[in-house]
Image (cartoon, coloured by chain):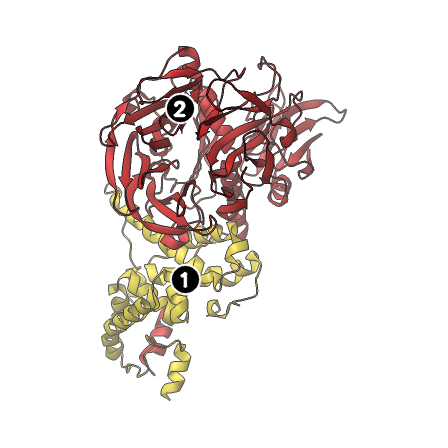
Amino acid sequence: MDISASSSTKKVSFSDFYDDHHDSIARALAVTLGDSDLASDATSEAMTRAYKRWSKISGYDKPAAWVYRVGLNWSLSWRQRRRREWHRPVTFGPDTDRLMSRDNSMDAALDALSVDHRAVVVCRIHLDWSVEQTAEALGIAPGTVKSRLARALSQLKPAAVRQGHRPTTADPTTTNSTPETIAKDER
Amino acid sequence: MTTDPYLRGHLQSRADEQTISVSSLQDITTAGDRSTRRTRLLGGFGAIALVMVGLFGVVGLQSSEKPTTMFAGLDAMFEGAPTTILATDDGWVGTVLIYDEDAWLLNEGGEIHLATSDDGESWELAERTGLLSDAQEIAIDEHDGRYWLAGAEGNEGYVAFSDDLKDWTRIEIPAVTESDDEMPDGLTRIVSANKLVANSAGVMTMFTSFVRPDFAYLEQKLGIESCGSVWTTSSTGTAVTVDLRPCGETEWQSTTVTGGGPTLPRPDPTLFFSSDGQTFEPVDLPTTNPVLRRVFGVQNLYSTGTGFGITGFDLHESSNGIDWTTVDVEQPSIPVLATAWGDQRLTAASLAPGPAASLTPGTVEVRLSADGDEWTTHNLNEVLGLESEDTNQSFIFTALEAGEAGWAISGSIVDDNLSDRMFDGEGTEVVVPMGDLELRATAPAGSAELVAEDGEVIASWHNFELGALDRNEYLQFQDDQFTLVDGRGELVAEGSLQPILSELQHSSGQPANVVLFSPDGETWTELERAVGYVAGLAVGDDEIVVARYSADGLTSTRLPVEAD
């Protein structure tokens, strides 16, 4: 993922940042939220907010993490508001028709996770962010990242086993190693 | 293969399958530029809105372009400085309003937090108060170790006190304003707590109910959801124009709300007093001239140490919070602000220039008295760099505070239509072709003229700001486009405003907001002239702390001074 490759020290222009990250952030949010439309809107909103404060945001260690976080919070707040409006019910969730042709058991296990836990999985595993970066992106303590990831993986492991995959012996909840490193270490 | 690579591959596959439709870079930057401009205007027009509300009862400009960090966690949401600052024996205490994550509309408000600082520049959030406020104004004071807060929810006010900044006892203040039933569709009232004074005589608080658009009603009327993106683009004494942006879109929709009468309902200031800190009763205002009272209301509440004082149509003081005496300040103009420290009182007044002013145009002065009887006048025009005879500029006082170090004033230099004046020479000249005409403007908020080929001025504006330009029957703005029609309705010119927007974005010119200081109330110096509306001002033992709105949010600065 190119998000993890962003420079932590060199400031980039907003247009370059947008070009490099808007798609990957939107897709990460879509996986987290299970709603690509909401993820697209959230990314647009978060990118707009980032643009408005780019002189400050660009100095962050990982601007993409800030955008992901704002987009995620925006989406969750949006959902909360919509849920309160009982007369306009909105159903959120994955496109089940599209998922029918795929690995249902792992998708079902992912969908069964709470958004909080799924967000940790996406940041840590999909986006390759470190524990600290994930903690910063989600506004939680590093210890919370580890505990949520451990809980999430324990819920996902049965699905992985059903697909014929062994659990890893390395524990990604307690190391900043990327999944590639974990796999190499295991070899 | 391990679980992690498998899971990672699965997540990647799932991500790749998503149908993503993020707004284009151009749409995002356009929306960002527009909202940045709108947000900046809130500070820039704060003083104007204050005056306009006070004098004419019009609806103030408001924006729901809340801080971009509003959803990003408590620490991140704290922008760095409070809006109301109080000097204490241990340092500084300020109020911070933090919006709830679900506060999509302005009328859903936020929670009051207190922040403390040792140096007036670095702030830390104290424990949550659990007190909510719909208005950005929050009043705070301290007396005998007890902290007092005044806030408002909807059209109801409250007072709360705490001895430790942690546990708060809330006291409801009923009937702060009139019933919402009397408001026409599209308008509602919101109460703000302007000032609270706690001293040995008791506790007095000042609330004002403002008229503002009912955004929820307007959303329903227009059939859209704005996600809080609302903006009051212009208001007169009879109507207010509101822009709302549907969720996730960049296009704005406008609607106009009228007051259902000859004028919009005026702000309604009220005072409440408690001698025991438990039961608050409305204060009967001393009424000398009902017309003046109606127009000027109560501008300011201050402590005399052992009593209270109010300014507005006149200066009045009370030692028991009930009986009032008129203080003759021998001032030809209405004292907008006043405060006291020790035995001394200081009043501040400036005359809005123009033909309506009956006295010397552009005069800015303070009056000082050690006994409330004899007063000395001290003109501030020179220190502000304003010519007394200049009818095109004046000074709007926004705060007058006193402390151990002396006296401090904040305000904005304005031109004759009460628009913020630019720093000299820092505006950017912009010339934009409009068909056969040219728009010649000083960006970002100077004057502008629409000039024909033969030099005839077709139209002019005191304040060139796209959001504030008159929307008349000839010149219309829609998004980034303009159209100009003649008196017969035929199109004269149309085109893009992007060149102007670009200049606005990059111009360095900003309104001049000034902080003055005097150790004795007589000799004044300019401490700071800077960009950004002053949100908070407090006087310490040997320093002034100023909180300003800036491009980075609220920031506070400690300015060392030498006491008398």
Q: What residue appears at the point 47 percent right and 28 percent down from the top-left corner?
A: B50
Between residue B206 and residue A131, name the one nearer to us: B206
Q: Which chain is yellow?
A: A
Q: Give the label, 1 or 2, closer to the camera.
A: 2
Residue B498 picture quarter:
top right
Question: Is residue B521 visible to the viewer in this orientation of the structure?
Answer: yes
Eyeballing the image, is B196 above or below B505? above
What color is chain B drawn in? red
In the image as oriented, which residue stretches furthest toward the right? Answer: B454
Q: What residue appears at the point 62 percent right and 24 percent down from the top-left corner?
A: B490
Q: What residue appears at the point 63 percent right and 31 percent down from the top-left corner?
A: B383
Q: Which mark is residue B309?
A: 2
Amino acid type, residue under disc 1 in the picture? Arg
Quarter of the figure that contains the N terminus of chain B: bottom left
In the rendered image, residue B467, in percent from the top left (x then y), is placed at 53, 33
Question: Is residue B17 visible to the viewer in this orientation of the structure?
Answer: no
Element marked by disc 1:
helix
Eyeballing the image, is A88 above or below B457? below
Residue B470 appears left or right of B65: right
In the rendered image, residue A157, in percent from the top left (x then y), is placed at 25, 76
Return the residue at label 1. A27
In the rendered image, residue B81, in percent from the top left (x then y), is placed at 45, 47
